[in-house]
């Protein structure tokens, strides 16, 4: 009995990620920082299932074993994402006391787009293109998000010395 014709399936993927960090001391103890990140992803896929007939010994088509509907499917997915974070950091020490402040914001955005189309009943296995068959209803998905966040922290570290008088003696406690 003859075997099934080979299906074709291929994917092409491109991916890119980048990140950069910058810092600049404006004055002593005050630093501006920027963290910037980007990513990009794209996938194109192609799937072709050829048609074929399996005949019984009497010459009739064996419908359960045959594939009379040659199918072509094409897809394209793209995703992008960006994250930008900007902060101001301030650090100051006065004798034994330390002060640290941070304030900033983050901006994040992402998009995702997906498209799928295809055709059924391709007229020939030798020319598997969309125009050689009955078009199917395509699908499309688009998703976009954006977010802004604000961040801030304050850290104080104080060291106190206390004088305690007990009778005629002074004691220092740290």
Image (cartoon, grey):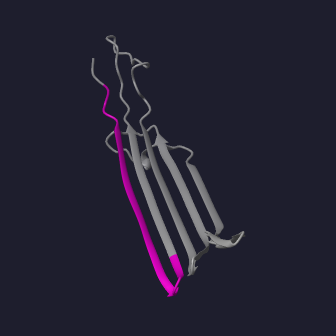
Horizontal side of 7 relative to 146 (left or right) equals: left
Residue displayed at 66% across by 73% down: 170
In the displayed structure, 172 sits above or below 4; it is below
Residue closer to the observer: 16 or 85? 85
Residue closer to the observer: 106 or 131? 106
As drawn, the residue found furthest toward the top would be 58
Residue closer to the observer: 117 or 145? 145
Main structural element of the magenta stretch: helix, strand or loop? strand
Where, quadrant-wise, is the N terminus in this rendering?
A: top left
| Residue 112, quarter of the rendered image | bottom right
Is residue 120 one of those drawn in magenta?
A: no
Residue 68 horizontal/vertical position (percent)? 42, 29
Residue 114 horizontal/vertical position (percent)? 53, 52
Where, quadrant-wise, is the C terminus in this rendering?
A: bottom right
In the displayed structure, 10 sits above or below 7; it is below
As drawn, the residue found furthest toward the left would be 2
Residue displayed at 56% across by 74% down: 86
Residue closer to the observer: 32 or 170? 170
Magenta region, residue range: 4-33
Residue 70 horizontal/vertical position (percent)? 41, 35
> How many dots with numbers?
0
Residue displayed at 57% across by 45% down: 137
Residue 31 horizontal/vertical position (percent)? 52, 81
Is residue 6 one of those drawn in magenta?
A: yes
Horizontal side of 133 relative to 100 (left or right) equals: left
């Amino acid at each position: 009995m003859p075997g099934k014709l080979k299906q074709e399936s291929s994917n092409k993927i491109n991916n890119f990620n980048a990140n950069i960090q910058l810092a600049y001391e404006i004055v002593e103890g005050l630093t501006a920082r920027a963290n910037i990140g980007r990513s990009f992803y794209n996938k194109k896929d192609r799937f072709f299932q050829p048609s074929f007939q399996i005949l019984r010994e009497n010459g009739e088509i064996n419908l359960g074993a045959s594939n009379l509907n040659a199918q072509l499917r094409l897809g394209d997915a793209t995703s992008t994402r960006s994250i930008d974070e900007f902060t101001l950091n301030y650090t100051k020490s006065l004798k034994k006391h330390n002060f640290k402040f941070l304030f900033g914001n983050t901006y994040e955005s992402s998009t995702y787009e997906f498209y799928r189309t295809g055709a059924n009943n391709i007229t020939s296995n030798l020319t598997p293109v969309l125009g050689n068959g009955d078009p199917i209803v395509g699908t499309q998905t688009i998703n976009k998000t954006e977010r802004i966040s604000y961040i801030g922290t304050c850290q104080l570290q104080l060291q106190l010395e206390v004088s305690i008088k007990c009778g005629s003696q002074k004691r220092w406690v740290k």
